[in-house]
Amino acid sequence: MAFSRFGSVLLLCVFIVLSSTVSISSASEEEKEYVLTLDHSNFSEIVSKHDFIVVEFYAPWCGHCQHLAPEYEKAASVLSSHDPKIILAKVDADAEKNKELAEKFELQGFPTIKILRKGGENIQEYKGPREADGIITYLKKQVGPASIEIKTSQHAESLVDDKKISIIGIFPKFSGEEFDNFMVLAEKLRSDYDFGHTTNAELIPRGESSVTKPTLRLLKPFDELFLDFTEFKVDAMENFIEESSTPLVTLFDQSPEYSVFLSKYFESEDAKVMFLVDYSHEEIENFRTIYHEVAGLYKGKGLKFLMGNVPDSQGVFQYFGVQEDLAPVIIAQNTDGLKYVQPNVQLSQIVSWLKEYMEGKLKPFIKSEAIPETNDEPVKVVVAKSLRDMVLDSKKNVLLEIYAPWCGHCKKLAPILDEVAVSFEKDPNVVIAKLDGTQNDIPSDTFDVKGYPTLYFRSASGKYVSYDGNRTKEDIIDFIQKNQDTVFESLKDEL
Ligand SMILES: *[C@@H]1O[C@H](CO)[C@@H](O)[C@H](O)[C@H]1NC(C)=O
Ligand SMILES: *[C@@H]1O[C@H](CO)[C@@H](O)[C@H](O)[C@H]1NC(C)=O
């Protein structure tokens, strides 16, 4: 059984934004809104007029978007008087009318912020902080040169710090193919990393200071601390940076500067291993050492490692449905989305557990709510643990809604499903049911959940059809009547 990747998208939405500081906006009511509101009718027109415009795609129900809003507005008001002007805009990407825009920008979660340059020709992901001052600093840098010339050691100090990655080109002169390619690279990756260039390697910390040929030096706050590279093809440099900029063990560090590493971790296509332990644990240093060694052992083998302090890792516990008091806990999620959990992990178990995981010897962990004690509402509650009995093997015609508690369309649908369920109450072969998709894992080879609500119908004989019709009582009842099997049909297999 394979499990949906949809979860990892949500995971991202939950985690990255945890780093934003929530500030309560002051009571003074501003009349003027500095953030432009765009929609499908004027998006292209406005964007095409600007050489540089920042667009936030949000959904009204998304809590992180609501936290961001006052910060974003504050940044917009400050940046409106910057020279050159920096325009901040927003689009409600959840609105039906803006659906095409949302699809065009391949949004993976909310909020998503994009930097559009040259009238929208060039699109970059905003990878900066989520509070006003951080947004301002980051965006000011984005309108300046893609790479800063380092002439003094002060320049070098301002570019290099111990929380982020800096990429510095060291050249005998600022011309030639190597230099040009470096500038192309800097323009391409400027929203991800800080770039600088110099003719004086002595100004650059770490590494050889007597550089004689063009050299790209990557400075990073972890592992080897610096790496040099001398092949000045854009693709090769990009690959080198991609490989070198992922820590061996990503930390669940929620400071804004670190968010780039966390998003890389959660966006990675690789399987993920997460170790959550209280940093006050008496054996913490040994845990750290072993875990880093294991990560080193599996380097390049399709696994990405993360370590987090229990109090900082609430989001992970919730996402995996694991109790906090089971820490130290090690969790793996493979590329099919299957989850593996080892609670109360001992120092001596880490190596062998991962070996068993790699050999496919572990049993997947299925997140589930408890089976409810009473279930006598018209719409029945299904959880992962009761999915088999109530749906997959039920021999009944089941309409199953997979919903999320925060989803507005689901709330709208709830009373309609109630009415549908009431209208079938006398028919013992039809069941209307719902499952909270955020709290229960379901097999993704049977249910393809790309959003909420997702409606599936399983006929008594086992045919699965997703329901994409209008969400009205009449249409849903009509659909069930057309697709249901009679009891006789469902028994045929067994006769
Ligand atoms: C774009 O159109 C919407 C809806 O008509 C409007 O509310 C918004 O103010 C317009 N934005 C700009 C920048 O003109
Ligand atoms: C849904 O409703 C709209 C308008 O009420 C109608 O045009 C459309 O054909 C309906 N779609 C289905 C699948 O019934």
Image (tube, rainbow, N blue to C red):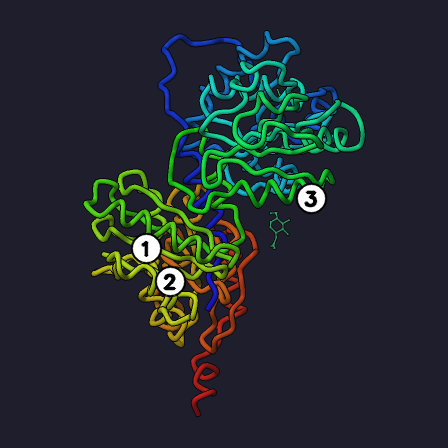
Residue depicted at 58% across the width and 41% down the height: 107
- Disc 2 marks which residue? 354
Q: Residue 163 or 265: which is nearer the viewer?
A: 163
Task: Name the element at disc 1.
Answer: strand
Comes first in the chain, label 3 or label 2: 3
Q: Foreground mark, 1 or 3?
A: 3
Task: Name the element at disc 2.
Answer: helix
Q: Quadrant of residue 10?
A: top left
Residue depicted at 36% across the width and 61% down the height: 340
Number of numbered discs on residues = 3
Identity of the residue furthest to the right in this view = 176
Q: Which mark is residue 236?
A: 3
> Pointers 1 and 2 in contact (CB under 8 A)?
yes
Task: Name the element at disc 3.
Answer: helix
- Disc 1 marks which residue? 330
> Is 370 placed above or below 167 here?
below
> Is 92 placed above or below 346 here?
above
Which quarter of the frame holds ligand 1?
A: top right
* Residue 237 in the image, given as x and y percentages of width and height: 67, 40
Quadrant for the C terminus, please: bottom left
| Badge 3 density bin: few <14, some 14–19, many ≥20, Cα 10 Å | few
* Residue 58 in the image, given as x and y percentages of width and height: 52, 32
> The residue under label 1 is which amino acid type?
Ile
Q: Foreground mark, 1 or 2?
A: 2
Mark 3 to mark 2 CA distance (whole Å)? 32 Å
